[in-house]
Amino acid sequence: MTRLHVAIPLRWSDFDAYAHVNNAEMLRLLEEARIQAFWRPDEGFEGAPTAVIDARPGAEMISLIARQEVEYVAPIPYMRAPIDIEMWVGRIGGASLEICYELYSPEGVTPRVLFTRAATTLVMVTAATGRPQRIPDELRSVWEPYLEEPVEFTKRG
């Protein structure tokens, strides 16, 4: 099982009156991790091995979010060290990609606490038309080593 580990620092503004990360800020944390893991970095900067989506203005193919699901397992308290976001690919479809996440306490902190499980479905589209575009083989080959079973959410009653 090959997963990416993305360290995301928490900001004081991520917290609400209950002294934990606000649920709306969770989507921002997921977005930050997704950008680091999947968007191609600018010239002269290093990125994750999976960072191959060209998200610059003028790109021919862009990614749009089609669906997000978040399960809050435990509140995230304020911590100075960045939280550890484990990421993997749960599914690669014709034009879509499911990105899975598990958010844990900072690396090296014991006990290790799972705070959140989440999944985002990205659809690759042609920028000019907004129509779905098949994921090219070269992107598939980069993401396939990170392919494993999708995130398993707690069963609902």
Image (cartoon, rainbow, N blue to C red):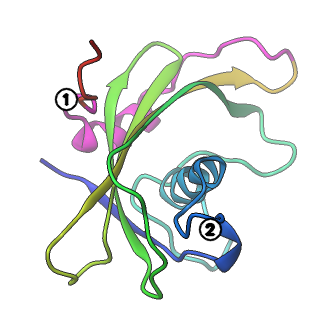
Disc 2 residue crowd, few under 14, some 14–19, many 20+, Cα 10 Å:
some
Q: Which residue is nearer to you in this view: 130 or 121?
A: 121
Outermost residue, bottom direction? 80
CB under 8 Å between discs 2 and 1: no
The residue that mark 1 highlights is 149
**For residue 123, above or below residue 104:** above
Tell me which residue sits at (31%, 58%) in the image. Answer: 4
- Secondary structure under badge 1? loop
Q: How many marks?
A: 2
Q: Which residue is nearer to you in this view: 106 or 64?
A: 106
Residue 33 at x, y percent in the picture:
51, 58
Residue 145 at x, y percent in the picture:
23, 43
Q: What segment is highlighted magenta in the picture?
A: 129-151
Residue 23 at x, y percent in the picture:
58, 48
Q: Answer left or right for 30 relative to 148.
A: right
Q: Quadrant of the C terminus?
A: top left
Q: In the rendered image, is residue 56 in sight?
A: yes
Q: Is residue 140 magenta?
A: yes
Residue type at tag 1: Glu
As drawn, the label of residue 15 is 2
Residue type at tag 2: Phe
Q: Which residue is nearer to you in this view: 1 or 12?
A: 12
